Amino acid sequence: MRTLKHPILTALLALPLLACAGASAQQAPSAYPSKPVRWIVPYAAGGGSDFLARSIGQGLTGRLNQPVVIENKPGGNTAIAASETARAPADGYTMLSADNGTLVFNPALYKKLSYDPAKDLAPVTLMGRFPMILVVGPAMKVNTVQEFLAEAKSRKDGLDYGSAGAGSPHHLAMELLKVESGLTMTHVPYRGASPALADVAGGQIPAMMVDLAAGAGFINGGKVRALAVANPTRLAQLPDVPTFAEIGLKNVEAAAQVGVVVPAGTPQAVIDTLNKQVVATINDPATRQRLIEFGIEPVGNTPAQYAELLTGERARWQKLISDLHITLD
């Protein structure tokens, strides 16, 4: 029997097959990546976030079989880099290191922001935490948190304290301590943790909150004294330093939390591929040990877990910022 072939009918019959093939290609993570991946860090080279990105990026290059290019774009309290990422094509070839400032604090600190972290950026994974530590300089004749609190309350005008910058996790961690303990303290912002630590060690500023990555050299060298960690548990690197919870301030928990985000609208298959490979790199024994030695608590979780964490962090910190009327405009 002869089969009649009509060109239009043949084309119509082929459409479902083409559609299925196209959908499979779109969903298949195996097609990604096919070119270098750009990783934006919103801070200058040499800091904790930069170290974290470069340490993970090195291993990620081999896992993705494509170069992972680190690009430092500091400025605007991370808003410059975040805005550029938000405007980038949603294809998985632009990723951003994003911390509390980028994703949690900035919307409450600024009346106008050039990006919306909840709408413009999609979470991939939380890479690591930098728990905050209360440190004092030699000019403060105190050895415990209790003594520090008593000394601060005994001074009519309270104490000054330094930070790595206005709106930084270091700044807001101390503001949290102020609220929870009823202290009077005046914020003195610096351009980074190192100059603030230098002034604490030199006696110009009595105290500050600092992360271990920035403060380990000062703490281990005896230039500043660590009094307490704003962490649920003691730090392995500082086993003799108590948590705030141990002295009755259970709500004083604070850390710089640095994760990876991509432009909103990035295909889920691509996000899942990135998540799988970034988490695998974090869990690589050599990479993990390197992060721990630097003072970072490695994490590596799912996009859903990271999104849930951000929701809780926004509720907690944005209320504090609003209640204290802290603005950076």
Image (spheres, rainbow, N blue to C red):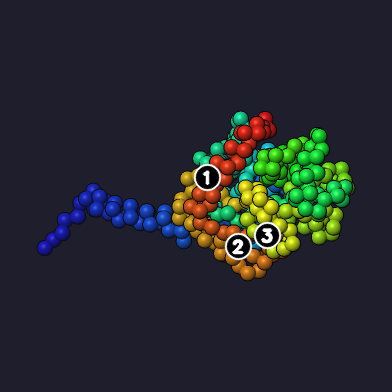
The spot of residue 14 in percent (x, y) is 27, 54
Residue, x 73% and y 39% (percent of image)? 183
Image location of residue 19, percent across then percent down = 33, 52
Query: Which amino acid, mark 2?
Result: Ile
**Marks 2 and 3, the one that precedes in the sequence:** 3
Give the residue pinned by disc 1: 311
**Element type where label 3 sits in the image:** loop
Give the labeled residue for mark 3.
234
Asked if labels 3 and 2 touch by Cβ distance under 8 angstroms, the answer is: no
SS of the residue at dot 1?
Answer: helix
Q: Which image quadrant is residue 115 in? A: top right
Among the two numbered marks 3 and 1 on one chain, the one whose residue lies closer to the N terminus: 3
How many C-alpha atoms fall within 10 Å of the one at disc 2: few (<14), some, or many (≥20)? Answer: many
**Along the line of sight, which residue is nearer the eye, 267 or 89?**
267
**Image coordinates for residue 118, horizontal then vertical, percent:** 52, 41
Task: Look at discs 2 and 1 and give the one toward the viewer.
Answer: 1
- As measured in the structure, the alpha-carbon distance from the residue carrying label 3 to the one carrying label 1 is 25 Å
Q: Nearer the viewer, residue 287 or 24?
A: 287
Q: At x 78% / y 47%, what residue is drawn? A: 148
Instruction: Give residue 111's quadrant in the image.
Output: top right
Q: What is the crowding at mark 3: few (fewer than 14 residues within 10 Å), some, or many (at least 20)? A: some
**In the visual, does 37 lie left or right of 212?**
left
Q: Which mark is residue 282?
A: 2
